[in-house]
Amino acid sequence: MNQEKQYSRNQSAENTEPPETSSRVTRQRSSRGEHGLGRVLLSFLGSMEVAITLFVVVGIASIIGTILQQNQAYNTYIVKFGPFWFEVFRSLELFDIYSSWWFVFLLGFLLVSTSVCIYHYAPFMLREWRRFRLNVSEKSLKLMHCSRLWKISQSQEQAAAFVKQKLANGGYSSREQLENGVLTIAAKKGAANRLGYLFTHGAIILICLSALYDGNFNLKLRELAGQLKPETRDLLASQVPSISRLGPNDNHAFRGSISLPEGSTTNIVFLQMRNGFLVQELPFNLTLHDFRIEHYESGMPKSFESDIVIEDQQTGEKISKTIKVNHPLLYRDFAIYQASFDDGGSIMDLQIWSLENGSRHIENFKQVVGKSRDIETAQGKVKLELVEFKASNVQPNPKAEETGHKFKNMGPTLTFRIRDSSGQAKEYINYVLPTEQEGRMFFLSGVRSSTSEPFRYLFIPVDEQFSLKRFFAFRSLLNNHAEMERISRKTAELSLQGDRKLKPELVEQMAVVMLRLADLFNKGGFDQVLEDINNKVPEEKRQTVTESYFKVLHTILGTVYLEVLQQEGVDIGNNITPAQEQYYDDLVNTMGVLANYDAPFYVQIKSFEHKQASGFQITRAPGKDLVYLGCIFLVIGIVLMFYVAHKRIWIRIKPIEGGRMNELLVAGSGDRHQKEFAREFEALSELLDREFKKDN
């Protein structure tokens, strides 16, 4: 389209079109431009303005489809954009742009528009490519920017032979015509420039055809017809009904994914479709034998690869292959990509420590990552969902200058959710191994209410055996009301034994206060104690009462701690060690904020059996060959249009002075790179100057 308009401008500027040819083209265009709905519609579809508009809109849509990850679960988009923008984007089908009705319509419109352009201008371009235009007038040649005139004594044949030889050396092909004694030679090179128009427009047609053929718009049509329905329930692949399944030959083009654990075999992939999925059956079995991954020091994946076996279901043929990122396996018309990796169902050996008041329940069981389990609590049944297990967890090393390592591996972590009966869930991440903090060891557990929040961490100190037994023994003793009454009375007597006026009533009152403070602390930590003081004590006395209460609280908690040590068999007769004192401080600090952890139990990972899974993306795109061909056409077209200049040179030899002399007129033009053509014309002129004497 641009080529045609440029050509028209050049002809108008240079006046090189002979009258008879110009009238013939005018008649042709006039016949095509006759009024009528069909002609008007063709003119509209073939206009450059429509094509540019379509290109811009398709380009913008493609940019959105590149930036916005396509075909993800709706919950992912809701979390990322919020309910309002999710509904806006969903109504515009931005989550599946390339299969949306409006994108398919645009591609079809662009295909028709480009085809009409070729229909309009291809015959003209082909004629122009073959044409030498020998009927050019002398006046038109003299008006060209590059034009020279010589008076020569050589004959027409001699002059024509010399000029044609020089033009041929310059890569020009030529034709000649003798009419009324005037010899006209028309030469040209770079005529393939005209074919660039056809190649570029043909490339657009091929790419649009491929996009329409490989799109899953046909699935939407089948869904509208009631023949297909995406599955929205969380079901096993074998439980998905037939209306949500596609046979090996039911879908000629698709892009699906599957997570395959080591040692497993599958013959399906999952196709994400809005808020559901389809099961696409494959004509072969895919087995993952081994998965390997390497990491950088920062913990980021360096490379990962899978050893797989493909077995054809009809022939039984087996192919073994190792696939890596950017190195897919091409099998028949399928491409299998190494896309991701995940947990393959690692087996966790768990110990559940109750955090509920009055409970000392401990439970041990094994659970597979990705599965859930119901657990009874004082508040009712909750669901423990194991989400993700990571064998390593690399973080920046705070002691990088001392150790020389910028990063530190914090060890394995388990991410899980605890979901109550109403469906509300909180997410937790627990470190399998104790972690050093300020020279002491703690088990770390993070909690958050949604994935958009950062984790808030609970630090649980470990005892000399790097276990949690002492911590939960301390909490268990606080939950034992009978034991706490005994310990409170004992502590009150010891606290008041220096008072000579000791009365039983005073000991009883002190024991009640200690028991009550310990119970408040056990239920809600320091915040619960402060809240009780603020509710019952006048403001002017709160500071004094708070100091007194916390002294009493630390006294009773210290006695409970000593009881725990005695139960362990620790000799406390000669006072406890500094490490045991530090453990007590950490223990009290953790208990003081334990209520904010908001979990009915603590999950400890005693051991695990790690299994990995490889994430594969399997595509079937029979139209890809059209894309490759279209890209080749596009490159050829661009090279021809922008880097190949169409150049023309005319030589007119006319007898003068009764045939004793000849007039040699040379003129030329180029459709681009005018300075380069001017230099080439000047070089030809110098050759002619040396060969012929110029008539001044």
Image (spheres, rainbow, N blue to C red):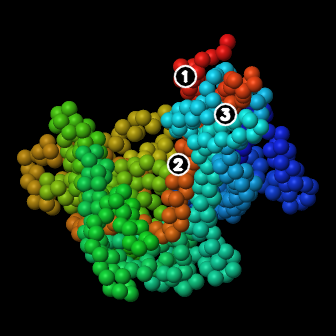
- Pointers 2 and 3 in contact (C-beta within 8 Å): no
Residue type (three-letter) at the residue carrying disc 3: Trp
Which of the image's four quarters has the C terminus? top right
Residue type (three-letter) at the residue carrying disc 1: Glu
Image vertical order of residue 670 relative to residue 498, above or below: above
Measured in 3D between alpha carbons, the distance from the residue under mark 1 to the one under mark 2, in whole angstroms, is 42 Å
Residue in view at x 49 percent, y 43 percent? 534
Residue type (three-letter) at the residue carrying disc 2: Val
Seen from the viewer's position, the closer of residues 44 and 638 is: 638
Neighbor class of circle 2 (other Cα within 10 Å; few <14, some 14-19, many 20+) is: some
Seen from the viewer's position, the closer of residues 343 and 324 is: 324
Q: Nearer the viewer, mark 3 or mark 1?
A: 1
> Which residue is disc 2 drawn over?
635
Q: Nearer the viewer, mark 2 or mark 3?
A: 3
Q: Position of residue 130 (x, y in %)?
A: 65, 49
Measured in 3D between alpha carbons, the distance from the residue under mark 2 to the one under mark 3, in whole angstroms, is 31 Å
Residue in view at x 74 percent, y 22 percent? 657
Q: Position of residue 128 (x, y in %)?
A: 69, 47
Name the mark on residue 491.
Answer: none
Seen from the viewer's position, the closer of residues 311 and 633 is: 633
Q: Secondary structure at mark 2?
A: helix
Residue in view at x 59 percent, y 60 percent? 206
> Which residue is disc 3 drawn over?
650
Seen from the viewer's position, the closer of residues 83 and 624 is: 624
Q: Secondary structure at mark 1?
A: helix
Q: Secondary structure at mark 3?
A: strand
Neighbor class of circle 3 (other Cα within 10 Å; few <14, some 14-19, many 20+) is: many
Pointer 1 or 2: first along the chain: 2
Furthest toward the right, the residue is 35
> Which residue is disc 1 drawn over?
691
Image vertical order of residue 680 relative to residue 234, above or below: above
Residue 21 quadrant: top right
